[in-house]
Image (cartoon, rainbow, N blue to C red):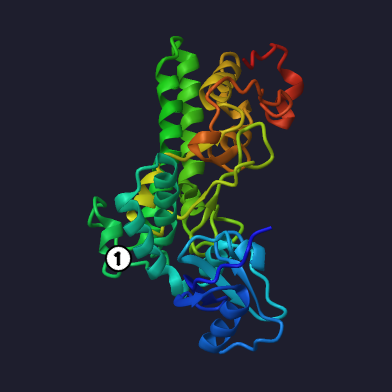
C-alpha cells in the first residue's frame, strides 16, 4: 500500500477538448481535482483524472507513483479518455488542424533518431501536405515542377500519364509484329496491329482512367483524385489498403509513377503470343480483335496495383480459346492454338 505524499508535486493537466496544458501542484488526487476543476471550469462532482498517454484512471494509490510533471486529462462525469490516440483521431477528423500537424511532425522529424518513427512521421507528412483541391499550374506551381509547360492542369497531365502507359502496350505489340519472320504472316500481324491502333485512338487511349474529372464509371480514382490499389492479379482486392492521391503533391505524383497498370492475363507472356499464333494460319479479319483489345488496353484485364502488390512471376492465366476467333469463323479453324 502506497502512502499519500504530503509534499505537493507539479503536474500538467488539460481538458479533453483543449490541447492547452496547465500546471497544477497537488499532494493528492482530491486536491488535484479541486484545483483542476476550478482552473478548467469543470464541475467537481463526478470529476476524475486519467493519464494522457494511455487513459489509465488515477487513483490515490496510483497518484503516489506518478513522476513530477506527468501529463493528465481532467474529465467530467460521463467523459472517457482512451489515451494519446484520442488526440490523433480528433486531429485527423478535422482539416483545421492540418497545418499544426504538419509543423509538429516536421519538428519531431528533425530530431528523431528511430528509423521506424521517422518512417511514421514521413508518411504522416506525405499525406497531410495535400493540395489536391488545386487544379491549375497557377494555383499549385510546386506540383508542376518538372512537368512540361504545355500542361496547364493536373488532370491534363494525369490523362497524358495514363495515355503514355497505354501507348507503351501498343509499342510492345508493334515490336512483336516486326519480329515475325514469314512475310505473309507479318502482313496479317501488321494489319491486326493497325486495327487495334484505330480502336485505341477512337477511345482516346483510355486516358480517362487517371482523370478525376471524368464520370465515375470511366475513372479509377475518386472525384478528389484518390486511387486505391486493386490488389495483385490473383487477389480480389488489396489486403494492405494502399492508396495515394497524385493530385495532392509533387511527391505523390512522382510516387504514383511506380504504381502499375498490371495485366491479369499477361501481355508479353500470353496475350501477344496468342494473337501472333492465331495469325500464323488465319487472316486478321478472322480474329476477334475486340477481345484482344480489351485484354491489352482496358480495365477488363488491367488492375491498378501498388508496387508492393505487383507480382512479377508468371501469372499462369490463359486467353479464352473460344474468344480468339470471330464467332462465324470459330468452326472453320482446326489448328490448335498454342496459348502459352
Q: Quadrant of the C terminus?
A: top right
Q: Is residue 171 left or right of residue 78?
A: left
Q: Position of residue 9 (x, y in %)?
A: 48, 70
Exactly how many numbered labels are in the figure? 1
Q: Nearer the viewer, residue 274 or 96?
A: 96
Left or right of 180 on screen, residue 217: right
Q: Give the vertical position of 205 relative to 171 (above or below).
A: below
Please report the residue visible at 50 percent of the width from the left and 66 percent of the height from the top: 71
Task: Tell which residue pokes out farthest to the right in this image.
Answer: 331
- Residue at horizontal 57 percent and vertical 26 percent from the top: 266
Q: What residue would you read off at disc 1? A: 140
Q: Identify which residue is drawn at 69% across, 58% down.
A: 1
Q: Position of residue 331 (x, y in %)?
A: 77, 21
Q: Please report the residue visible at 53 percent of the width from the left and 56 percent of the height from the top.
A: 221
Q: Is residue 323 visible?
A: yes
- Say which of 303 and 73 sits in front: 73
Taking the image as shown, residue 59 lies to the left or right of residue 91, namely right
Residue 20 seen anywhere in this rendered image of the structure: no
Name the residue nearer the viewer: 45 or 215: 45
Amino acid at each position: 500500500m502506497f502512502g499519500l505524499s504530503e509534499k505537493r508535486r507539479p503536474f500538467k493537466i488539460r481538458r479533453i477538448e483543449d490541447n492547452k496544458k496547465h500546471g497544477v501542484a497537488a499532494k493528492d488526487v482530491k486536491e488535484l481535482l479541486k484545483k483542476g476543476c476550478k482552473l478548467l471550469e469543470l464541475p467537481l462532482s463526478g470529476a476524475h483524472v486519467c493519464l494522457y498517454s494511455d487513459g489509465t484512471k488515477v487513483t490515490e494509490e496510483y497518484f503516489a507513483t506518478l513522476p513530477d510533471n506527468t501529463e493528465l486529462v481532467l474529465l467530467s462525469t460521463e467523459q472517457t479518455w482512451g489515451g494519446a490516440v484520442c488526440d490523433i483521431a480528433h486531429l485527423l477528423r478535422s482539416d483545421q488542424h492540418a497545418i499544426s500537424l504538419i509543423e509538429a511532425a516536421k519538428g519531431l522529424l528533425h530530431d528523431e533518431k528511430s528509423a521506424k518513427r521517422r518512417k511514421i512521421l514521413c508518411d504522416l507528412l506525405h499525406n497531410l501536405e495535400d493540395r489536391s483541391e488545386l487544379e491549375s499550374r497557377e494555383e499549385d506551381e510546386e506540383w508542376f515542377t518538372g512537368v512540361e509547360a504545355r500542361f496547364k492542369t493536373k488532370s491534363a497531365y494525369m490523362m497524358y500519364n495514363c495515355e503514355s502507359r497505354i501507348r507503351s502496350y501498343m509499342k510492345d505489340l508493334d515490336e512483336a509484329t516486326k519480329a515475325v519472320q514469314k512475310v505473309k504472316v507479318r502482313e496479317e500481324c501488321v494489319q491486326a496491329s493497325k486495327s487495334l491502333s484505330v480502336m485505341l485512338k477512337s477511345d482516346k487511349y483510355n486516358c480517362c482512367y487517371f482523370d478525376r474529372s471524368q464520370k465515375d464509371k470511366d475513372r479509377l480514382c475518386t472525384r478528389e483524385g484518390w486511387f486505391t490499389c486493386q490488389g495483385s492479379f490473383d487477389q480480389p482486392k488489396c489486403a494492405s489498403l494502399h492508396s495515394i492521391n497524385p493530385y495532392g503533391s509533387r511527391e505523390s505524383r512522382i510516387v504514383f509513377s511506380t504504381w502499375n497498370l498490371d495485366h491479369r492475363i499477361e501481355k508479353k507472356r500470353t496475350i501477344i503470343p496468342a494473337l501472333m499464333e492465331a495469325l500464323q494460319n488465319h487472316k486478321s479479319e478472322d480474329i476477334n480483335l475486340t477481345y484482344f483489345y480489351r485484354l491489352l488496353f482496358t480495365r477488363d484485364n488491367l488492375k491498378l496495383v501498388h508496387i508492393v502488390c505487383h507480382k512479377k512471376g508468371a501469372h499462369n492465366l490463359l486467353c479464352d480459346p473460344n474468344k480468339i476467333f470471330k464467332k462465324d469463323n470459330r468452326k472453320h479453324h482446326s489448328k490448335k492454338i498454342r496459348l502459352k
